[in-house]
Amino acid sequence: MAAEAEALQLRTPVTSVRRLSESLNSIPSNYTFFTNPVATVAKDAGDLIPVIDISELTSGDSRRRANALEELDKACQEWGFFRVVNHGIPEKLIESVINVSNEFFNLPDEDKPEFQPQNVLEPIRYGTSFNTSKEKIFCWRDFLKVFVHPQFHSPQKPASIRGIVQEYCERIRGLVIQLLEGLSQNLGLEQDEMEKTLNLESGLQIFAANYYPKCPNPRAALGLVPHSDHGLLTPLITNGVGGLQIHHDGEWINVPTRAGSILVNVGDHVEIFSNGKYSSVLHRVVVNDESPRISVAIANGPSLETIVRPSEKLIEKGGGAPLYAPMKFSEYLMSHQSNSLHEKSSLQQLKIPH
């Protein structure tokens, strides 16, 4: 026992946490976030999570659309998070995305891309935690991040991943445009204002698959630390295993899984564009000792060359003084990905004191 305890104090080499988890009865010290077992306990959300019905949002009936717009506006102001239903993306395709992601993480190492490439903006990145070069304690997850728009990239294996990811991401882009049109309208702007101003035709879209293995000490570890997302909206699907928690009204809330729905995080650049009317959501991932969790998040941002600032038209309409300094999206992304995750630190750096 003494030898095992001593071994746990040693920092293990950076490796796939999936591989690491296969040979451990306890987690190493460099994966231990908490010694207090209640630190990851959260309130159950029940039916509190806002639900946006896309069939209502896109309805030709003005009353139904107005009601959906009101629900979207409320969700983005009060939660920065919501669930979409009747989105039109086939359940079979969603299952295929999860399955092919699982296949990827179970490939032999020689069939995967380079592990932990140094360039954080490499179009295909396979790695672990978030940014191990900056972190003292690592997250209990492996990831695959792939740039899929405006130029599409894909790993070579599994053989089916290219077609599945391409179809799914195209459909997600369509869903995101529908939601952003609603947000533009709610801000009192033209329906296509966000799409045009943020150059979404050339917008950056990133496919991010996450693998959270079973963890022998789940109350001591985290799958992802509290953070907000770069970009505009991040739709998320899972394999049905829970673990996502969002911060709302000063407390952490467990987000239940619901078949047929897609979760959506509001990102930092919606908060910037709306001059703080809408808020990006602070969220984290906890792990368990029973089942691996797989999630796939699709980050949707402006074009890399777009300078994002509070909407000038919104400010002109009486939206108050700008609360955020302008910054090119590529610079924001580089800063966000090059450092360790810490709540909304990237966004806070742009806040203009008043």
Image (tube, rainbow, N blue to C red):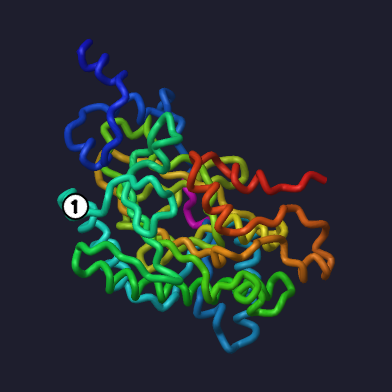
Q: Above or below — where is 84 with respect to 33?
A: below
Q: Give me the residue at 44% from left, 54% from top.
A: 121
331 with respect to 164 (left or right): right
The image quadrant that residue 20 belongs to is: top left
Element marked by disc 1: loop
Magenta segment, prevailing SS (helix, strand or loop)? loop
Percent position of residue 260, x then y: 37, 68
Foreground of the two, 28 or 222: 28
Q: Can residue 331 be seen in the rendering of this structure? A: yes
Residue furthest bottom in the image: 60
Three-letter amino acid code at disc 1?
Asn
103 with respect to 139 (left or right): left
Foreground of the two, 204 or 273: 204
- Marks counted in the figure total 1
The image quadrant that residue 191 belongs to is: bottom right
Percent position of residue 214, x then y: 26, 41
Q: Magenta segment range?
A: 44-48
247 with respect to 288 (left or right): right
Percent position of residue 51, x then y: 52, 65
Q: How crowded is mark 1: few (under 14 residues within 10 Å), some or many (20 or more)?
A: some
Q: Above or below — where is 169 with respect to 331?
A: below
Residue furthest front in the image: 119
Q: Give me the residue at 34% from left, 73% from top.
A: 166
Q: Give me the residue at 52% from left, 45% from top.
A: 227
Q: Does the magenta stretch include residue 285?
A: no
For label 1, the residue is 106
Q: Above or below — where is 176 with respect to 120?
A: below
Q: Give me the residue at 68% from left, 48% from top.
A: 350
Foreground of the two, 346 or 190: 346
Q: Can residue 296 be seen in the rendering of this structure? A: no
Percent position of residue 160, x then y: 21, 69
**Considering the image in quadrants, where does the N terminus appear?**
top left
